Amino acid sequence: MAKVLIIGAGGVSQVVTFKCAQYPEVFSDIMLASRTKSKCDVIAADVKKRYGVEIQTAQVDADNVEELVTLFKAFGPK
């Protein structure tokens, strides 16, 4: 099983999140993070409604290396 971290809450990342959620046997843990956590929360709620899969959300500024490192260490994507 893989832990995947998806950064961004735009159209492409939304499609990627939905595709990952369709294969829980491959992607056991999914986290969606962006500068605006509320956008991630909306996508996560839609994923839960459609596929019954819980995904985690987080706020991160992808331009801030320290924030990214902290998130990587905390979530541990593989």
Image (cartoon, grey):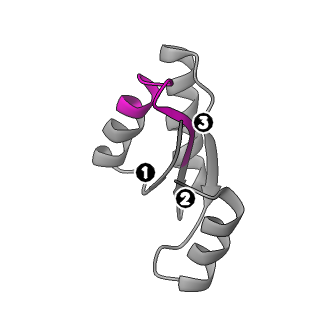
Tag on residue 36? 2
In the image, what residue occupies the spot 59% across and 48% down? 38
Farthest residue to the left: give it. 12
Do the numbered discs 2 and 1 sit on residues whose CB atoms are within 8 Å?
Answer: yes
SS class, disc 3:
loop
In the image, what residue occupies the spot 63% across and 58% down? 76
Q: Which residues, given as a range, are shown in magenta? A: 18-31
User: Where 45 falls versus 68 (above or below)?
Assistant: above
Q: Quadrant of residue 42?
A: top right
Q: Nearer the viewer, residue 28 or 57?
A: 28
In the image, what residue occupies the spot 41% across and 33% down? 20
Crowd class of label 1 (few under 14; some 14 to 19; many from 20; radius 10 Å): many
Tag on residue 55? 3
Residue carrying label 1: 9
Q: Earlier in the sequence, mark 2 or mark 3?
A: 2
- For the residues labelled 2 and 1, the Cα–Cα distance comes to 8 Å
Q: Looking at numbered disc 3 in the image, what kind of residue is underneath it?
A: Ile
Q: Looking at numbered disc 1 in the image, what kind of residue is underneath it?
A: Ala
- For the residues labelled 2 and 3, the Cα–Cα distance comes to 16 Å
Q: Nearer the viewer, residue 29 or 7?
A: 29
Measured as percent of width and height from the top left, residue 15 is found at: 31, 37
Q: Earlier in the sequence, mark 2 or mark 1?
A: 1
